[in-house]
Image: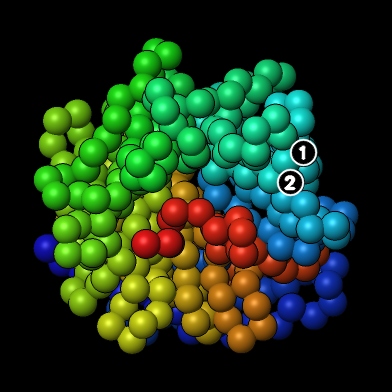
Amino acid sequence: MSYRKLNYLAQATLGTVLGLSTLALSNNTPAQAASFEITDFSSISGATDVQVNGINDSGEIVGYYVDANGNVESFSYSGTTYTPLNGPGGATDVQAYGINNSGEVVGSYQNGNDYNIDGFLYSKPTYTTLNGPSGAIYVQADGINSSGEIVGYYVNANYSTVGFLYSGHTYTTLNGPSGATYVQADGINSSGEIVGYYQDANGNIDGFSYSGTTYTTLNGPGGATDVQPYGINNSGEIVGYYQDANGNTDGFIEEGGDYTTIDYPDAIDTYVTGINNNGEIVGYYQDSQGTFGFTALAEPVPEPLTILGSLTAAGLGVVLRRRQGRLKNHRNTW
């Protein structure tokens, strides 16, 4: 297993809010560099916190934001157009997590009838509620592939958290490797390979990939803890994030046992949450100024080490971790 780290040194002048900016990226690892494009979400009227979670091959992005009244709303974003995703009738706290190439979106919402958290599938113009296996009291749908297969997790009556695959109107539970006490499934590709993470008997958080009958543990690069994969594309590239030896959070891309760490320039923490078949990734990072969303090329590109990329920025999109306050989900709560 090999490991490489992309720790970009950025020199950027953003200038006016509506201006054109040039971002210079240099890399301290030979022949490893990538360009980052800041994704603008500030044009959502009244939005204070925006989270981007998934991207399809057309570059359509889904996520959610907190409005001026503290309500959580979801959206899809394509080019320059935002489309609200309001969930089924009576839904609140709608949160979109994944999108496939047909534009089908999955996520979760709070049910106004019983205040439970239910999953949803949105296939224009219809919302379908995903109630999970029998006895589920909390359901979150996180990923969807081109065949419409959905993965996520649910909490049962014993308050155990279990992963699931929903295919052909049937739920299949994903219990993780032997000894797992908590399992969350987050991404699925067209071959049906699933990624997610679990808590083992010792309380450690490890990533996994699952291909029908076999779980493979993903331990991250050397010294990594709390390894949490979130997405996988059809080439088998896996993205997610982990905690490093310094206690910081780093994003990663894994392919064939090789890990590439993604540290956004000057960031304290970097989270990578999705990848499409073109190698574009989405995620967010935290620095001294706040938390911001980004899209990036997933693959390092050859020399020269310094890449000048022009990007249009109408502002920096502020993003949150998966939940804040009462909205914190089981992704980071153990």
Give the residue number, with chain letter if any, for mark 2. 73
- Residue 169: image x %, image y %? 42, 14
**Of labels 1 and 2, the one closer to you:** 2
Could you tell me if residue 114 is visible in this image? Answer: yes
Residue that extends furthest to the top in the rendered view of this protein: 168
Mark earlier in primary sequence (1, 2): 2
Left or right, 38 with reference to 196: right
Which residue appears at 65% of the width and 38% of the height?
Answer: 115
Q: In this view, does 333 lie above or below 192?
A: below
Q: In this view, does 96 lie above or below 329?
A: above
Which residue appears at 33% of the width and 86% of the height?
Answer: 246
- Residue 156: image x %, image y %? 39, 37
The answer to whether the residue labelled 1 contacts the one labelled 2, judged by CB atoms less than 8 Å apart, is yes
Left or right, 315 with reference to 269: right
Give the residue number, with chain letter if any, for mark 1. 84
Type of amino acid under label 1: Pro
The crowding category of the residue bearing disc 1, from other C-alpha atoms within 10 Å (few below 14, some 14 to 19, many at least 20), is some
Type of amino acid under label 2: Glu
Which residue appears at 34% of the width and 73% of the height?
Answer: 243
SS of the residue at dot 1? strand
Q: In which quarter of the image is residue 233?
A: top left
Q: In which quarter of the image is the C terminus?
A: bottom left
Q: In which quarter of the image is residue 14?
A: bottom right
